[in-house]
Image: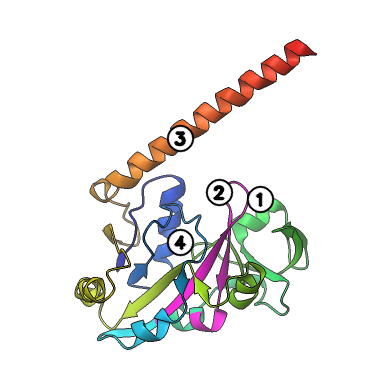
Amino acid sequence: MILTLVGISYGTLDEAARRARGVGADILVRPPGASVISLSTSPMSQEFLPFFMKQPHVTFATGTMIQPLSGLDTLTGVDLADFDKLSGGFRFLKGGPFEHDDDLIVDEYYAREKKLTVGSTIELMNRPWRVSGIFESGKLARVCAQLTVLQRLTGSPRKLSQIYVKVDDPNRAQPVVDDLRAKLPVLHERGRLEYQEDAPVRPSTTICTARTTIQMFGFFMRTGRALLTLQRISNCLT
């Protein structure tokens, strides 16, 4: 399977690669400047979907919206009917799909980490959500809401963060990407990665994001030292 996306490194980013691999798409389209760790909003119009669907060798296209939460967590808006067509859908371990606008579905790891079960309530984006289902991890995201609901709550109607494209033959993915680049120069599809089910991401594809990861690690380390210094000062003053 070929995915075209901003390069993915190790650790947290490698987990993102694993989930992307499970989506079933051949091409992932993100706008210029999209975050390497998917902490993005929704700068692309949903009107791109019919355009992609009309392209040669493209069999299906759907998009998601990604809303940053606290830390590195995100809430992904997804159209379950479209996701079913793209990948066969989520495999629910408990519960099932959304039933109401305030429903969430979460993967098994997130449920275990947050001690959630079907019917649990969790507060995200300063509002309560009910867990309607827990799905097997490894597909798309850890926490999902209805796409239209998330678009409405964030004031981003018909906006997407990224678009997943499936082609009739994975070997044709790169020519399709080249054609899309020519037709839509405003979009950047970078860091061509080849995924094999049990193979690690090759280091040669991760130089850019490895550097970004190191920079982020350095930022967090500096921030942690600054907070520790402030705590020590506070302790001295008290």
Q: Which residue is mark 1?
A: 113
The quadrant of the image that shows the N terminus is bottom left
Callouts 3 and 4 close, C-beta under 8 Å: no
CA gap, disc 1 and disc 4: 18 Å
CA gap, disc 4 and disc 2: 15 Å
Q: Which residue is mark 2?
A: 72
**Three-letter amino acid code at the position of disc 4:** Arg
Q: Is residue 167 visible?
A: yes
Residue furthest out toward the right:
238
Q: Is residue 24 visible?
A: no
Kindly report which numbered mark, 1 or 3, lies closer to the viewer in this rendering.
Answer: 3
> Can you give x and y, in whole percent of width and height, for residue 159 in the image?
51, 73
Residue range (magenta): 61-82
Q: Which residue is drawn at the image coordinates 45% and 38% (left, top)?
A: 216
CA gap, disc 1 and disc 3: 23 Å
Q: Which numbered disc flags the more N-terminal residue, 1 or 4?
A: 4
**Three-letter amino acid code at the position of disc 2:** Leu
Numbered mark located on residue 19 in the image: 4
- Element assignment for label 3: helix
CA gap, disc 3 and disc 4: 22 Å
Q: Which residue is mark 3?
A: 217
Q: Which numbered disc flags the more N-terminal residue, 3 or 4?
A: 4
> Can you give x and y, in whole percent of width and height, for residue 141 in the image?
53, 63
Q: Which numbered disc flags the more N-terminal residue, 1 or 3?
A: 1
Callouts 1 and 3 close, C-beta under 8 Å: no
**Three-letter amino acid code at the position of disc 3:** Phe
